[in-house]
Image: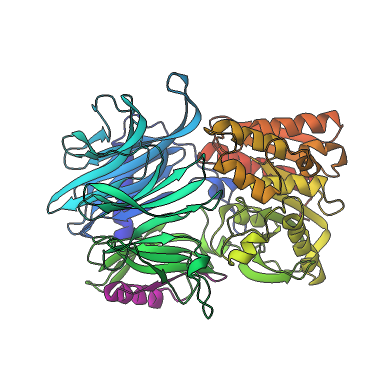
């Protein structure tokens, strides 16, 4: 049974890792009818990044026990483990096969290296694991003059039986460029494949590993340029001034003779058709042609061998959906949908021949399960669970909802209710997502589920400014920090109260990143709605945040600053109008106790934002608690600090808004 092989391989991987410290002692088992401990929700997924090899004959994955991670590799044909390697406490960001013999693990860490001008940045490194030799080597090693960090995503190019890795790296001898290097994963030999200056933002490779298209972005002029290969040089074929929404190079077109570009081209709009989001640009002629789908895609899919466009995926209130132009992929996915008619399965990886795949399901009575699909053998097998400490009968029900905001705009979202409780007069937690250009979706959400397990209904509203509902809905959030993006949440509270589902006198607000700002704004800008607020890595001072971003770029008026200005509705670091929507400057107006939680290694929203909020609340004599998480980043990437965040949040909410 595949599940047992995965368990055995995970055990062997950990037993082979001499440097891995003992895992944290397990929590006591819950009694009959009791909810799982909070650590079952807050722990890192016990299984993640499950990847099939190109042949489909092998599988690699990351397994987690406590705070420690390990890479495990199994042979699906001969039914045996191929070994593993310890990753320890490193933050694993990606896993991919290099041919059928080696696995690349990409990890990151928060670093400050003043000697090379790096201050609190997330740096990425790659390690190549060879199961046959039980050896792990750094991807960029022994390369004279190269800084040993990955400066781009990693592309694997296969020519016959040989595989090479292409990645950008920074050279101490070439301060003007971040060049593209070709790395032999066996010998470690690294040589420059193409010169690229700092303005090269992205590129598309053909099957040989040669870039056929590039994009440049000049921060000073704000001009984005598309360059197409003309022999040994590149010719600029189109440019646009893009202060914020720069176009994006996506990949090769469906025939390999074009590239796909995501761009705003109102000049190509036809009177009888909506403007396209994606365009197919011919590599030879530079001609643009709109690429249209029957739905608004959330992402595009490319063939694992040719790299050509072959399908698209979308998100709707029922989960993730797929559509394929490739016949083999269509057959595979039809089998997946037939097998999981209600699970909204998500594609994780598949083999080169599109005959085997790994899919992930979560949601109704499913805390997250990986499955192996084999068309050739006609079998479907469970691989393992992501949150194995949350049994199916303890997964709280989550249902899509929709309500009207005060100005009539329709807001979509989800309501999670405690297991076995009728959705009537329940205490509520508003859980606001980050971004703000992001979205909650129908899936097992460890944070929402943990709060529901403590007796609360949980509202996750995709307020205006969220993605997934079209450009107009996204643009409706511009300038609405502390305004309509905020009242969309409280409008959801009022709607739920009108439906009789929640008790409006027992509501708290919780969130991280932008959601942390929303929590603080809920306690300072809106009065009488929330009994308490929990901000995790939240922004508290808008002007100070913009000033921070201005100091991190090569220019103070950089793209990040312009992004913040758009959503906040400000005009740069000196705009004092932002103070009227900054919770740290409105501390005297706080009408609810506030809990602040922030990671000391946060490189997105600096911990100073929470420190400033705490100081302001204490000066105003308002109730506040502040917890700093050692070694934690913006994304809650570590198990011990993530569990602590969840535990402290539950403790604080239960003290200020008891569920019973």
Q: Which residues are magenta?
A: 317-341
Residue 536 vs residue 12, the one in the foreground: 536
Display coloring: rainbow
**Residue farthest to the bottom, as pictured:** 272
In the rendering, at what x and y percent does residue 625 appear?
Answer: 75, 34
Q: In the orientation shown, which residue stands out farthest toward the left?
A: 160
Please say if 321 is above or below 528: below
Residue 320 in the magenta stretch? The answer is yes
Name the quadrant of the N terminus.
bottom left
**In this picture, residue 80 sits left or right of residue 555:** left
Q: Is residue 397 above or below residue 117?
A: below
Residue 565 left/right relative to 60: right
Q: Is residue 270 magenta?
A: no
Query: At x 78% / y 49%, what residue is drawn?
Result: 522
Residue that appears at 77% across and 29% down: 615
**Image spot of residue 623 (x, y percent):** 82, 36
Q: Quadrant of residue 585?
A: top right
Q: In x, y percent, where is residue 257?
A: 26, 64
Q: Give the number of marks.
A: 0
* Nearest to the observer: residue 252 or residue 644: 252
Query: Which is more toward the observer, 494 or 573?
Result: 573
- Residue lying at the far top of the rendered structure: 115
Place of residue 520 in the rendered image (x, y in percent of width and height, measured from the top left) = 75, 44
Does residue 346 appear in the picture of this structure?
no
208 on left or right of 486? left
Is any atom of residue 325 visible in this view? Answer: yes
In the picture, which quadrant includes the C terminus? bottom right
């Amino acid at each position: 049974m595949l599940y047992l092989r995965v368990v055995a391989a995970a055990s062997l991987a950990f037993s082979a890792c001499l440097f891995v410290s003992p895992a944290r002692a397990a929590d006591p088992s819950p009694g009959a009818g009791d909810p799982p401990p909070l650590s079952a929700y807050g722990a890192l997924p016990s299984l993640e990044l499950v990847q099939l090899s190109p042949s489909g004959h092998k599988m690699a994955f990351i397994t987690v026990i406590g705070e420690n991670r390990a890479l495990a590799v199994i042979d699906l044909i001969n039914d045996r483990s191929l070994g593993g390697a310890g990753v320890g406490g490193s933050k694993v960001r990606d896993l991919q096969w290099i041919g059928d013999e080696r696995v690349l693990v990409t990890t990151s860490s928060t670093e400050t290296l003043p000697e090379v001008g790096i201050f609190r940045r997330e740096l990425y490194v790659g390690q190549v694991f060879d199961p046959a030799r039980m050896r792990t080597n750094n991807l960029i090693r022994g390369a004279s003059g190269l800084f040993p960090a990955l400066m781009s995503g990693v592309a694997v190019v296969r020519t016959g039986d040989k595989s090479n890795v292409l990645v950008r790296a920074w050279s101490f001898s070439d301060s003007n460029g971040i060049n593209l290097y070709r790395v032999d994963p066996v010998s470690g030999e690294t040589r420059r494949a193409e010169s690229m200056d700092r303005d090269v933002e992205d590129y598309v490779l053909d099957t040989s590993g040669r870039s056929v298209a590039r994009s440049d972005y000049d921060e000073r002029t704000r001009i984005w340029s598309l360059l197409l290969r003309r022999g040994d040089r590149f010719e600029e074929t189109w440019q646009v001034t893009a202060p914020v929404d720069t176009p994006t190079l996506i990949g090769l077109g469906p025939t390999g003779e074009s590239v796909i570009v995501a761009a705003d081209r109102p000049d190509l709009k036809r009177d009888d058709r909506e403007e396209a989001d994606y365009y197919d640009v011919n590599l030879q002629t530079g001609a643009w042609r709109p690429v249209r789908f029957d739905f608004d895609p959330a992402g595009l899919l490319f063939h694992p061998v040719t790299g050509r466009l072959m399908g698209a995926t979308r998100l709707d209130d029922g989960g993730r959906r797929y559509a394929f132009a490739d016949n083999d992929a269509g057959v595979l996915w039809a089998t997946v949908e037939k097998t999981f008619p209600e699970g909204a399965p998500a594609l994780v990886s598949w083999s080169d021949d599109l005959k085997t795949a790994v899919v992930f399901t979560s949601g109704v009575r499913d805390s997250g399960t990986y499955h192996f699909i084999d068309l050739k053998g006609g079998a479907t097998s469970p691989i393992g669970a992501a949150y194995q400490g949350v049994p199916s009968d303890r997964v709280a029900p989550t249902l899509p909802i929709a309500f009207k905001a005060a100005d009539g705009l329709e807001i979509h979202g989800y309501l999670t209710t405690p297991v076995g409780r009728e959705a009537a007069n329940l205490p509520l937690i508003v859980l606001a997502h980050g971004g703000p250009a992001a979205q909650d979706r129908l899936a097992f959400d460890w944070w929402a589920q943990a709060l529901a397990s403590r007796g609360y209904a949980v509202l996750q509203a995709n307020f205006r400014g969220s993605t997934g509902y079209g450009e107009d809905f996204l643009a409706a959030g511009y300038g609405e920090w502390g305004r309509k993006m905020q009242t969309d949440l409280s409008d959801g509270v009022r709607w739920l109260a009108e439906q009789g589902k929640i008790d409006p006198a027992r509501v708290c607000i919780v969130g991280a990143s932008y959601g942390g700002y929303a929590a603080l704004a809920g306690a300072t800008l809106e009065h009488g709605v929330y009994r308490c607020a929990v901000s995790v890595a939240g922004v508290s001072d808008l002007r100070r945040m913009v000033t921070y971003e201005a100091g991190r770029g090569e220019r103070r008026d950089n793209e990040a600053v312009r992004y913040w200005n758009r959503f906040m509705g400000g005009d740069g670091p000196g705009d004092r109008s932002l103070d009227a929507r900054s919770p740290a400057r409105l501390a005297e107006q706080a009408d609810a106790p506030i809990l602040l939680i922030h990671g000391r290694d946060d490189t997105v929203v600096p911990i100073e934002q929470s420190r400033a909020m705490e100081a302001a609340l204490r000066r105003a004599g308002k109730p506040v608690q502040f917890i700093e998480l050692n070694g934690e980043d913006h994304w809650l990437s570590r198990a011990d600090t993530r569990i602590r965040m969840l535990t402290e949040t539950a403790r604080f909410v239960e003290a200020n808004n008891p569920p019973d």
